[in-house]
Amino acid sequence: MNCARKKRKTRCAKKPKCATFKCQRSGPVTANGFLNFLRSYRRKHCDLSPIEMLRKGGAAWHNLSEREKNRYRRQACKVTTSCRHKRRRVCTS
């Protein structure tokens, strides 16, 4: 009586990670204006390490005018606060 043997699956060669991988993963729009700014900053400066990106992104946020900051804050107001209740944040400005 022959025992059935499981066939081994051939593994595919692992694809090398490309340098643009960081640029593609920018994250979701959040309820925080600063984090929304970092999303766009990360797309433009994907060659930086995460620590350098945060340092330079924080300095760039500090140098933005209130009008430019409000653009990212408005994105935060459009985000639902809870997926269960589907409520929207009320923007005061």
Image (cartoon, helix red, strand yellow):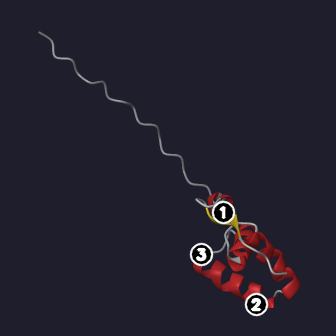
Circle 1: residue type: Pro
Q: Which residue in the protein does label 2 denote?
A: 62
Q: Position of residue 16 (x, y in %)?
A: 54, 51
| Marked residue nearer the N-terminal end (1 or 2) | 1
Q: Which residue in the protein does label 3 denote?
A: 50
Circle 3: residue type: Pro
Discs 3/1, front? 1
Q: Residue furthest left?
A: 1
Decide: marks 3, 1 in contact (CB < 8 A)?
no
Crowd class of label 1 (few under 14; some 14 to 19; many from 20; radius 10 Å): few
**Quadrant for the C terminus in the image:** bottom right
The quarter holding residue 34 reads: bottom right
Q: Secondary structure at mark 2?
A: helix
Q: Is residue 82 above or below residue 16?
A: below
Circle 2: residue type: His
Q: Residue at x 88, y 83 (%)?
A: 67
Q: Which residue in the protein does label 1 denote?
A: 28
- Kindly report the distance in space between the C-alpha atoms of the residues bearing marks 1 and 2: 22 Å
The quarter holding residue 4 reads: top left
Discs 1/2, front? 1
- Kindly report the distance in space between the C-alpha atoms of the residues bearing marks 3 and 1: 17 Å
Q: Residue at x 78, y 75 (%)?
A: 72
**Quadrant for the N terminus in the image:** top left
Crowd class of label 2 (few under 14; some 14 to 19; many from 20; radius 10 Å): few
